[in-house]
Image: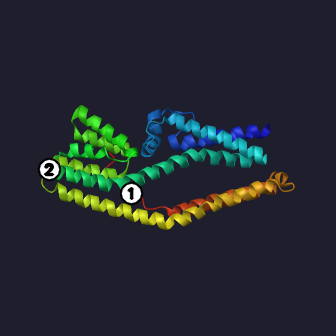
Amino acid sequence: MVGILLAAAAAGGTYLLYTAVAFGWRGIGRRSLVSPSRRARPLRSWLRGAGLEEVPVAEFVGAIAALAVVGAAIGAALFGTLLPAVAGATLAAALPVASYRRRREVRRAEAQDAWPRLIEEIRILTGSAGRSVPQALFEAGRGAPQGLRAAFDAAQREWALTTDFDRAIQVLKARLADPTADAACETLLVAHHIGGTDIDRRLEALAEDRRQDAQGRKDARARQAGVRFARWFTVVVPLGMAVVGLTIGDGRAAYQTVAGQAVVLAGLVLMTACWLWASRILRLPAERRVFDR
């Protein structure tokens, strides 16, 4: 019973820490009067980048809190002490964040691969086919990957309702939330306003630049594949040894001693440090959005 109560307390603490970071909540007082929309804006932008703009922020936070409770209960049931319960709550709460972050990375890589082809198609449509820039953009968007098509549909609806290409481009950039999309959309917007005969050359240069960037990132990820796989051993091996230790002799009781708790704490700190260190080394340079107005 005591373990369950400690697990619930650990889960509640994890939830409060997360909301403080994600929403800027600082407790009861004047600062807590900031509107929920402003507190949730960074998280909404992050979810939009992962293609999950329709997921309510409250639902996302609720999933984190629920998983934290489950993780804390599992940690308390296995080891019977507070520290594993806190560690279980933290790890379980990080699962949705890691999952959505991975989804965002996959979606961004998919967009980087797709944009050179889309730009080339827009170049052909605005050139030999004689389409206007908005028509070429939305026609090419129909052949975009499934994860990007909803953004093109939303931008096309905005264009159909307002015939304002600026607003349509803003909708497209907001839904895609991608640096490559920002560069392509701004180039098309300038071409639409200024016109001229050099739009073909500009689009060709942009497509080649995006193609080289995407190929370079593919090569880098291919070289890192083995190291990324080996990184999981920093988590799987220590956790596997800890679980096996529970079944040997009085291993469960050993974890409940002061020395056992100190060893568990040191192991968790080392695991986290190794994982973060490896992630930092393997991180590819990320393009920054410079047209996200």
Gap in Å between the C-alphas at discs 2 and 1? Answer: 28 Å
Q: Nearer the viewer, mark 2 or mark 1?
A: 2
How packed is label 2: few (under 14 Cα within 10 Å), some, or many (20 or more)? Answer: few
Marks 2 and 1, the one that precedes in the sequence: 2
Left or right, 203 with reference to 107: left
- The answer to whether residue 32 shows anywhere in this view is yes
Q: Quadrant of the N terminus?
A: top right
The residue located at (22%, 37%) in the rendering is 164
Above-or-below relation of 72 to 59: below
On screen, residue 243 versus residue 231, left or right, reads right
Pointer 1: what residue?
287
Residue shown at the point (55%, 38%) measured from the top left:
61
| In-image side of 260 versus 235 (left or right) | right
Does residue 257 show up? Answer: no
Q: Is residue 38 left or right of residue 149?
A: right
Residue with the mark numbered 2: 195
Q: Position of residue 2 (x, y in %)?
A: 79, 38
